[in-house]
Image (cartoon, grey):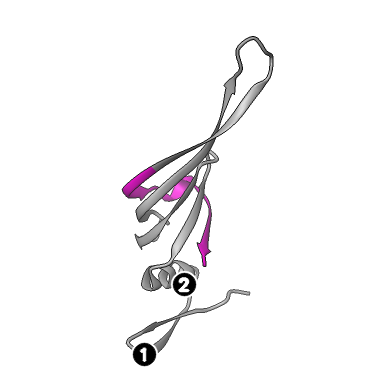
Amino acid sequence: IMQQNTYTIEGTKTIIPGPFSLLKTITYSNSKIIVSSNDNHKFYGYLKGFDRHSNLFLEDVTEIWKEEIKVKNRKTKKTILKEKFIPKMFFRGDSIIMIAKLD
């Protein structure tokens, strides 16, 4: 069952049908999203546009990922969290695993 999303422009409530309804609603409401990619990186930003291939145009993006670093004189590895800011980015749709709206 697909849920229909709504958005409001100038006081008028509009229903958006179809599989891209969530992306349309996020774009119109200027909400923040999280995108998980196939290389285990997470991207937090504002969705500004998309197309039928799920290619995304994002602004004010923060990329977050984990890296393992080998500790000297030990056989263990230390995991650290890395972060990078990207002002504008085009995200190719075939590398997207998950898209979620952040409230």
Q: Amino acid at mark 2?
A: Ser
**Where residue 55 appears, x then y in whole percent?**
39, 54
77 and 22: which is toward the camera:
77
Q: Which residues are magenta?
A: 85-103
Task: State the residue lying farthest toward the bottom.
Answer: 11
Residue holding disc 2:
21
Task: State the residue lying farthest toward the top.
Answer: 73
Q: Which element is circle 2 on?
A: helix
| Residue 92 covered by magenta stretch | yes
Q: Nearer the viewer, mark 1 or mark 2?
A: 1
Residue holding disc 1:
11
65 and 22: which is toward the camera:
65
Q: Which element is circle 1 on?
A: loop
Q: Crowdedness of circle 2 by 10 Å Cα count: few (<14), some, many (20+)?
A: some
Mark on residue 80? Answer: none
Q: Is residue 31 above or below residue 59?
A: below
**Where residue 16 appears, x then y in whole percent?**
44, 79
**Which residue does the image show at 48% across and 69% down from the upper left?**
22
